[in-house]
Image: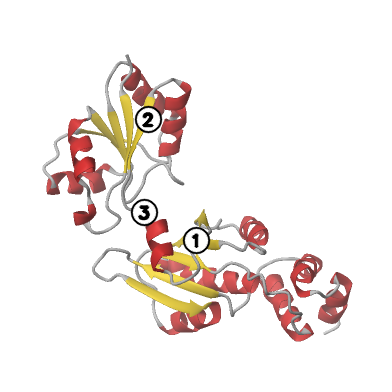
Amino acid sequence: MSGTFYVIGTPIGNMEDITLRQLETLKSVDFVCAEDTRVTVKLFNRYEIKKSLVSFHEHSTPAAAEAIISRLLAGESCGIVTDAGMPCISDPGEVLVRMCAENGIDVKVVPGPSAVVSAVAVSGLPTSRFTFEGFLPVPKKQRTERLELLRNETALMVFYEAPHKLRATLDDLAGFFGGERRISLCRELTKIHEEVLRFTLDEAREYYSSHEPKGEFVLVLEGAGKASGEKITIESALEQVKKLVDMGERPVDACKAVAKESGYKKGELYSAFCGK
């Protein structure tokens, strides 16, 4: 009979956020898969957990995954943790969950803190619907394509971002969604320097032009409003076109994108933009 694979949430910053069930499960399994064993061992030392740790991360080989599945099929139980929060979401652990399902291995969840849900809860924005987008692609073409897909999204959009990329990301978001779109920037959640800043995109860009971004960020961006059908001025539309062109889009593609939401015709925008 095969063992059980436990997906175990861990604190996202404050170690006191661990639950009794998480501690009990970590102490009862035969071994634990960790994204970074150096991070997990700090948690284990804090709560006197003495378990064998197996490294499993984005660079782990298929053979490493097969070895873990083999141990489970042999009857051992295993827990998986990430460096912070819930594993297996935008995380290499999803591979192991899929392989467990394919091999008939029982998977149980031991839930814990989530940076995504925590940020949405304190954002101060409408929370009935949200979409988790993780980190935006770094290459300009893929980033533009992703943002284009989200242009008319009405739900809250949640992004992760590192401090050294924050300013560029705010510029890109403003280029696609307009500077008046509201955003909550949640920094260092549950840690000593936890901070939630609520701005428009333009206000956020101005703030971080004179403040150095520090810590890990969760960005909660307001969705497109239902009442956003009012026609914008041609000047505003052309400014959006310019921002997209500055980000690397061809003028014809930028005009096509802005035409969809502005009410102006693509040709009208193209002629006005290229005639400047």
Q: Which comes sooner in the sequence, label 2 or label 3?
A: 2
Q: Residue furthest left?
A: 48
Relative to the observer, which residue lies in front, 143 or 158?
158
Residue type at mark 3: give it: Ser
User: Mark 2 packing: few (<14 Cα in 10 Å), some, or many (20+)?
Assistant: some
On the image, the x and y values in percent for residue 18 come to: 22, 50
On the image, the x and y values in percent for residue 258 come to: 75, 71
Left or right of residue 215, residue 43 in this image? left
Which label sits on residue 158? 1
Asked whether disc 1 touches disc 2, contact meaning CB atoms under 8 Å apart, the reply is no
Q: Which comes sooner in the sequence, label 3 or label 1?
A: 3
Residue 231's image quarter? bottom right
- Secondary-structure class at tag 3: loop
Relative to the observer, which residue lies in front, 264 or 156?
156
Residue 273's image quarter? bottom right
Kindly report the distance in space between the C-alpha atoms of the residues bearing marks 2 and 3: 19 Å
Q: Is residue 147 above or below residue 232?
A: above
Residue at mark 3: 114
Which label sits on residue 107? 2
Residue located at (19% from left, 31% from top): 28
The quarter in which the C terminus is drawn is: bottom right
Asked whether disc 3 touches disc 1, contact meaning CB atoms under 8 Å apart, the reply is no
Residue type at mark 1: give it: Val
Kindly report the distance in space between the C-alpha atoms of the residues bearing marks 3 and 1: 12 Å
- Secondary-structure class at tag 1: strand
The quarter in which the N terminus is drawn is: top left
- Secondary-structure class at tag 2: strand
Q: Residue furthest front?
A: 128
Residue type at mark 2: give it: Val
Left or right of residue 35, residue 30 in this image? left
Q: How is the image coloured?
A: secondary structure
